[in-house]
Amino acid sequence: MNENGSLGSRYVDQCQVSGNIVPRTTEKIYEATITLNARCPYPGLTFKGIAFLRDSYVTENTPTATVNRFYLVATNNDGGQRRGLLFVQTLEGQISDDVPTNQ
């Protein structure tokens, strides 16, 4: 995720995605749109859903570090076929309290 809310793939030899997230009025919850591109199942389909952050928790592997997770859950109903995706990314460090919101 980039500062402007755009999303994209990092590695060209893997599934390529593009999209964006827009903050809701609730802090750390976002509207999400993701399009599957090259090297993905169902290339060209767009999924819409939500994304959120779960921050400031300790794991068994990092008992003294702060670990954060970014979740994105989205669905697609093109052609009457329902599909869904779940994306989870682990982020290290403290998430800022200055996360942008639509207020």
Image (tube, helix red, strand yellow):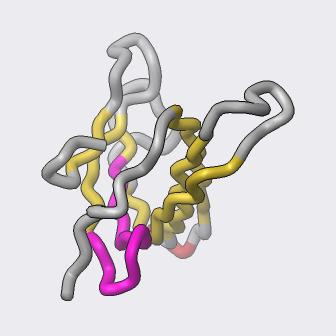
Depicted 46 relative to depicted 102: above or below: above
Residue 80: horizontal and vertical position, in percent?
54, 75
Q: Residue at x 31, y 43 (%)?
A: 1
Of 13 and 89, the residue lying toward us = 89
Res 89 → quadrant: top right
Residue at the limit of the structure toward the front, as seen here: 64
> In the picture provided, is 100 more to the left or to the right than 76?
left
Percent coordinates x, y for residue 50 in the rendering: 46, 70
Which residue is painted at 38% across and 75% down in the image?
A: 27
Instruction: Report if residue 29 lies within the magenta region.
Output: yes
Which residue does the image show at 45% across and 27% down from the upper left? 15
**In the rendered view, would you say 81 is above or below 92?**
below
Q: Quadrant of residue 73?
A: bottom right
Q: Position of residue 97 (x, y in %)?
A: 36, 62
Q: In the image, is 63 to the left or to the right of 14?
A: right
Nearer to the camera, 17 or 26:
26
Q: Which residues are magenta?
A: 23-35
Residue 30 covered by magenta stretch: yes
Q: Magenta region's main secondary structure? A: strand
Instruction: Residue at 41% x, 68% y: name it.
Output: 28
Q: Residue furthest right?
A: 60
